[in-house]
Structure formats: structure tokens, C-alpha cells
Image (cartoon, helix red, strand yellow):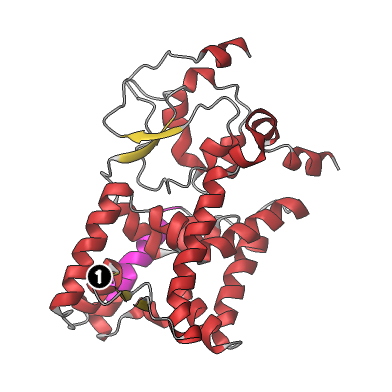
């Protein structure tokens, strides 16, 4: 019972301080983004409204804007299939976008599977499920490497054989089928086997986009880290909690408050749940080694 009450208190202070919307603002915006993008892809095949043609691998918006997933394009190239000029333009647009805003923004703001894994994490917390299998966070980079090498050896875009995002799209369009089994497997894996296991340990797409966004200028910053009261709520909600500590605690000589780890998804949940407003979005260049400023309100608490 105490375990459940502890879970229920995550973010409670933020709700009390900022109100419910203020404590869920970035989460709501993410869901609107994910659902809007998914809806745009489904409007064509389901309703005949072709605003966007294709899927997240390759799409054509309003017959003007081409977008191509660079990870799929790279596998295709290694498999001996050179993308057409329009596809290469789409690769350039996507790479530039994710370089600027952070590669793993794809994971938290675009990928529909994120809603599945977040649902599994929410239910896992509510059920009080503890313990899990363990895999290194580097496993996803090994999977990434294997898909690239495998594509080159077999001449097949390997990831598309099991890509859960593509399968989810097909499942929503064509109904119940084998595609849903893959999505269900991911949900059950994160629920019973490993918390945040799929996105945080196995998915090569997240691994690829972390490399794309390694030097991205847009970052989350613990700019008021001296106001931190060690409630640990940010660690509880973060899908990659290992990225927080160096910036929040200034671990290491001259470590500034900006979260520079490429696996940060820029999801904004740490901003939501912090009642002290320690976190905010900013630029990687605004990263002084020492931050001693505390807002007047925070200093009084």
C-alpha cells in the first residue's frame, strides 16, 4: 500500500505548485504531436484525404515536401538500392531537422510506439511490478550495427522485416493481424520483463537518432539546479534517467547544467514534474560550469 502511495506522489508537488496542466504540459504536447502525425498518415488510406502519402520511412506531404528516414535509407544504400533524388532530398531535410532539435525527439515526439511503451511503464508502476532482466544500454547500438551489416550482406532492408512502427500502421489500416502481435510483444516486454526495455535497450532507431543529434543545439538544462530538493521525481519519469545526474549534480570538474547526453529524448517530463522549475529547454552553448542562481520563490521554499 505504501509502495502504491509513493508512486502516486510522483509529480504531486508539481501539480500542487503549478496545477495539473502545468505539471503535464510537455506530456500533453507530445501526445498531441504523436497522435496528429499518426492521424495524418491514416487519413489517406482510411478516409481518402491524402494530406500525407506514405509512412514514417518515406512520406510526401501535399505533393511538395519529401521526408525520408535516414536510417532506412542507409540500410537501403548498403543493400545496393540507391534512393531516388527526391528520396535523398528527404533524407537531407530529416537529418537537418533532427540535428537541430535533437535526434531522439523522434522517439518522444513522433514515434507512435512510444505511446505503447509509456502505457506499459504506467501500468507497471500502478501494479507495483519490481525487478527486471538487465541489458546494457549499449545493446541498441549492437542491434543498430547488426541491421546495417545484415542489410549489406543480404541485400534486404532488414529492419523493415520487424519494424514495429510500420507494423502498427498496417495494423491500424488493415485490422487485427500478425502486426499487432509484435506491438503486443513490446508492450508485454516492457510491462513484465524490463522497464523501458524496448526504447532504452533494444530499439536501433533510437540508437541511430542519438548519433544524429549528438551535437544538437536544443537541449534540456538544469539551469536552476541549486534549487533541487532531491525529490527524485525527474529520475522516476525520465525514459533515460542516466542522462540527468551529471548536469543536475554537476558531477565532474566544470560540468555545466545542460544535459549533453545524446540519449536524452527532449521529452520535457523532467520540466513537467519539477516543482522547483529546475529544468527548462535551452541551448547547449548556454552551459556555464557553475550555476548558483535561485529564483526568489524557490529560495523561500
Q: As displayed, is residue 70 above or below residue 86?
A: above
Identify the residue at image location x=32%, y=41%.
218
User: Is residue 14 covered in magenta?
Assistant: no
Left or right relative to 64: residue 194: right
- Examine the rendering and report whether any part of residue 266 can be seen: yes
User: Circle 1 — which element?
Assistant: strand
Pick the front one: 122 or 301: 301
**Visible in this render: residue 238?**
no
> Magenta region, mostly helix, strand or loop?
helix
Residue at left 30%, top 80%? 157
- The quarter of the image holding the N terminus is top right
Bounds of the magenta span? 137-149
Toward which corner of the image does residue 163 lie, by quadrant?
A: bottom left
Q: Position of residue 47 (x, y in %)?
A: 49, 84
Q: Which residue is mark 1?
A: 65
Q: Position of residue 195 (x, y in %)?
A: 60, 55
Determine the residue located farthest toward the right in the rendered image.
Answer: 1
Q: Could you tell whether 1 is left or right of 87 in the image?
A: right
Instruction: Please say whether residue 146 is one of the residues in the magenta stretch.
Output: yes
Q: Residue at x 53, y 12 (%)?
A: 296
Residue displayed at 58% across by 80% down: 180
Residue 134: image quadrant is: bottom right
Q: Is residue 188 above or below residue 178?
A: above
- The x and y percentages for residue 196 are 56, 55
Amino acid at each position: 500500500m505504501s509502495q502504491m502511495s509513493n508512486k502516486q506522489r510522483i509529480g504531486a508537488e508539481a501539480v500542487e505548485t503549478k496545477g495539473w496542466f502545468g505539471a503535464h504540459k510537455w506530456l500533453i504536447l507530445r501526445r498531441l504531436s504523436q497522435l496528429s502525425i499518426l492521424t495524418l498518415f491514416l487519413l489517406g488510406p482510411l478516409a481518402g484525404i491524402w494530406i500525407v502519402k506514405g509512412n514514417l520511412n518515406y512520406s510526401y506531404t501535399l505533393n511538395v515536401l519529401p521526408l525520408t528516414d535516414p536510417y532506412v535509407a542507409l540500410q537501403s544504400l548498403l543493400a545496393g538500392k540507391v534512393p531516388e533524388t527526391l528520396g535523398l532530398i528527404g533524407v537531407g531535410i530529416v537529418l537537418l531537422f533532427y540535428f537541430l532539435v535533437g535526434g531522439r525527439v523522434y522517439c518522444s515526439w513522433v514515434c507512435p510506439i512510444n505511446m505503447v511503451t509509456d502505457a506499459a511503464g504506467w501500468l507497471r508502476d500502478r501494479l507495483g511490478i519490481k525487478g527486471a532482466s538487465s541489458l546494457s544500454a549499449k545493446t541498441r547500438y549492437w542491434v543498430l550495427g547488426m541491421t546495417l551489416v545484415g542489410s549489406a550482406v543480404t541485400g534486404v532492408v532488414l529492419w523493415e522485416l520487424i519494424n514495429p512502427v510500420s507494423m502498427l500502421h498496417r495494423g491500424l489500416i488493415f485490422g487485427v493481424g500478425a502486426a499487432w502481435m509484435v506491438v503486443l510483444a513490446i508492450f508485454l516486454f516492457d510491462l513484465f520483463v524490463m522497464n523501458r526495455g524496448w526504447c532504452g535497450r533494444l530499439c536501433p532507431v533510437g540508437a541511430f537518432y542519438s548519433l544524429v543529434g549528438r551535437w544538437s543545439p536544443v537541449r534540456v538544462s538544469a539551469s536552476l539546479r541549486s534549487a533541487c530538493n532531491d525529490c527524485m521525481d525527474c529520475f522516476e519519469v525520465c525514459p533515460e534517467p542516466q542522462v540527468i545526474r551529471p548536469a543536475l549534480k554537476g558531477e565532474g570538474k566544470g560540468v555545466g547544467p545542460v544535459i549533453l547526453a545524446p540519449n536524452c529524448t527532449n521529452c520535457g517530463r523532467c520540466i513537467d514534474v519539477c516543482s522547483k522549475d529546475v529544468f527548462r529547454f535551452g541551448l547547449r552553448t548556454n552551459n556555464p560550469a557553475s550555476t548558483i542562481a535561485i529564483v526568489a520563490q524557490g529560495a523561500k521554499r
